[in-house]
């Protein structure tokens, strides 16, 4: 083969190869890779696997969880809160069955049911959450909590707007509200949470702060509502709230009777603002006179005392049934009291005194807003012994010495451990009285004061929710209920 023939051959081969390549390019189609649409399952942020249908997994969960349905009385069970399913497009084909995924997740995270999340936001911005199945149970629990502190007929008239003007005695409510912000929203609730399924348990939780209300006391002979409350570190009002079947603090008790002594601790404080009108007995005062013509062993009643009567209206604010502030709006005297006058012999006596009768520390009429005994502090929210009586709702704010004596403490300024401006008087015979929260102190340490002398002005200095006098009395160094002096 000559050189020219070789060249023609190579050219022909090149043309043939090019034609073949063109032919292959025209007729060849590469195999297509199929894109699959699946669902990627995550639990707590971790990949569980791919499934073909998210709906099938949801159906599987609902079908299998019969026990949860029976426990809560629901018709549907939902996926765990940490379960996330995302639709993905992928070339992968390693799909798990719904049964495989269900078996993998069923014991890792609790399933959920549909209900409501209730949030209580307190004044310090702390929050408490609880979970309920039915919104109606919350309405019922709120009402039951209010009715623990407010008469039902009065409450219903307030809601209906049918309250009548009080002419003789009664209460006109101007406002009822929670002292905290309460919100409710629909949610899927983990079955690991405490879920309230009825209004009875929820009402109990709202009132006592727990569903484990089992603390009871068996009445002993000679027990009274007051002694049972004190011995169980409760206030009388709280004991009556915990035992709505008891008629009042003077209820007669039977030995062996069981009393609920679980402390009342509402999840949210119930505030009631009202005008309260009442007929108030104005107790007569006992005045002492001395007769130098008869011996010291003799005494007689020169004039019998007669109680008076007033109709008084107070503007009040109560927290969980306990008055935290009150002011006298009006007072009508129906009958003036008449003093009892007792004459004691003082023959051959150059100095005499008498601690048999004690003066009341404020003008009358008045209102006792907190008694001696245990209570939840209205500011600190802790249970403590209220070591005196709180007196408020007076027309004049003058404070009087309840007996003659010597001023042993007078603090005209400062917080003073919550006592505010205060005066302490030693009356002798082991008695010491203490007057707190004054707006002004009118005596100084070392002064001698007479019974009924003005020693200061009522106020709200120190730790106080409203204008009032806190009176504490000690006898021989021991706290006593100041009201025992007037019995």
Image (cartoon, rainbow, N blue to C red):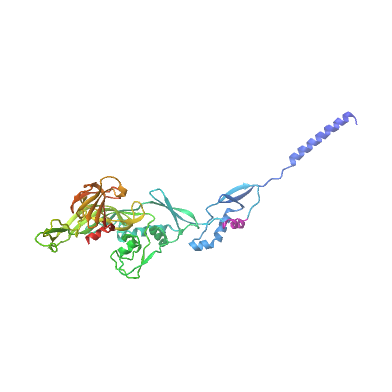
Q: Is residue 104 magenta?
A: yes
Q: Is residue 393 left or right of residue 100?
A: left
Q: Residue furthest left?
A: 293
Answer with left or right where residue 342 lies relative to residue 214: left
Q: Is residue 453 left or right of residue 179?
A: left
Q: Is residue 143 above or below residue 40?
A: below
In this rendered view, identify the residue nearer to me: 185 or 150: 150
Expressed as whole percent of the image width and height from the top left, the position of residue 299 reads: 13, 63
Q: Position of residue 110 (x, y in %)?
A: 53, 57
- Image quarter where the C terminus lies is bottom left
Classified by dominant secondary structure, the portion drawn in magenta counts as helix
Q: Is residue 468 visible?
A: no
Nearest the eye: 441 or 299: 299
Report the label total.
0
Residue 406 covered by magenta stretch: no
Left or right of 79 on screen, residue 354: left
- Identify the residue shown where x is 23% and y is 59%: 485
Q: Is residue 220 visible?
A: yes
> In the displayed structure, would residue 37 be above or below residue 67?
above
Q: What residue is shown at x 61% (from left), y 50% (from top)?
A: 38
Please state the extent of the stretch shown in magenta in the rendering: 97-107
Q: Position of residue 418 (x, y in %)?
A: 31, 49
Q: Is residue 300 above or below residue 116?
A: below
Front position in the image: 103 or 482: 482
Where, quadrant-wise, is the N terminus in this rendering?
Answer: top right
Q: Residue furthest right?
A: 1
Residue plotted at (24% across, 60% down): 484
Q: Position of residue 107 (x, y in %)?
A: 56, 58
Relative to 30, residue 186 above or below: below
Q: Residue 65's image quarter?
A: bottom right
């Amino acid at each position: 083969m000559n050189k020219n023939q070789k060249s023609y051959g190579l050219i022909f081969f090149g043309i043939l190869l090019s034609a073949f390549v063109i032919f292959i390019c025209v007729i060849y189609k590469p195999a297509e890779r199929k894109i699959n649409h699946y669902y990627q399952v995550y639990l707590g942020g971790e990949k569980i696997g791919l499934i073909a249908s998210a709906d099938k997994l949801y159906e599987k969960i609902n079908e299998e969880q019969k026990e949860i349905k029976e426990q809560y009385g629901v018709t549907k069970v939902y996926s765990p809160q940490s379960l996330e399913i995302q639709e993905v497009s992928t070339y992968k084909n390693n799909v798990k069955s719904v049964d495989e995924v269900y078996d993998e997740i069923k014991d890792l995270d609790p399933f959920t049911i549909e209900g409501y999340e209730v949030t209580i936001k307190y004044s310090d911005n702390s929050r408490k959450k609880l979970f309920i199945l039915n919104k109606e149970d919350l309405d019922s629990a709120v009402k039951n909590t209010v009715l623990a502190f407010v008469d039902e007929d009065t409450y219903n008239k307030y809601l209906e707007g049918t309250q009548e003007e009080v002419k003789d005695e009664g209460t006109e409510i101007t406002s009822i509200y929670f002292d905290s912000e309460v919100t409710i929203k629909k949610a899927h609730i983990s079955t690991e949470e405490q879920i309230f399924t009825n209004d009875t348990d929820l009402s109990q939780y709202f009132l006592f702060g727990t569903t484990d209300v089992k603390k009871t006391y068996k009445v002993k002979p000679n027990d009274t509502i007051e002694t049972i409350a004190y011995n169980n570190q409760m206030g009388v009002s709280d004991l009556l709230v915990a035992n709505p079947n008891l008629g009042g603090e003077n209820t007669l008790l039977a030995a062996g009777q069981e009393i609920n002594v679980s402390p009342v601790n509402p999840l949210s404080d119930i505030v009631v603002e009202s005008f309260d009108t009442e007929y108030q007995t104005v107790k007569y005062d006992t005045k002492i006179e001395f007769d130098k013509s008869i011996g010291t062993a003799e005494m007689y009643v020169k004039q019998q005392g007669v109680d008076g009567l007033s109709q008084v209206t107070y503007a009040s604010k109560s927290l969980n049934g306990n008055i935290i502030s009150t002011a006298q709006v009006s007072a009508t005297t129906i009958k003036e009291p008449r003093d009892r006058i007792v004459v004691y012999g003082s023959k051959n006596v150059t100095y005499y005194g008498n601690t048999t009768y004690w003066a009341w520390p404020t003008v009358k009429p008045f209102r006792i807003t907190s008694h001696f005994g245990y209570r939840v502090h209205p500011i600190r929210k802790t249970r403590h012994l209220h070591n005196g009586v709180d007196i408020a709702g007076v027309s004049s704010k003058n404070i009087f010495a309840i007996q003659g004596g010597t001023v042993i403490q007078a603090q005209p300024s400062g917080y003073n451990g919550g006592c505010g401006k205060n005066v302490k008087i030693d009356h002798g015979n082991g008695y010491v009285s203490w007057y707190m929260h004054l707006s002004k102190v009118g005596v100084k340490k070392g002064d001698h004061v007479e019974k009924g002398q003005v020693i200061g002005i009522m106020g709200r200095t120190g730790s106080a929710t409203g204008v009032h006098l806190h009176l504490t009395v000690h006898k021989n160094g021991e706290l006593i209920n100041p009201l025992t002096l007037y019995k």
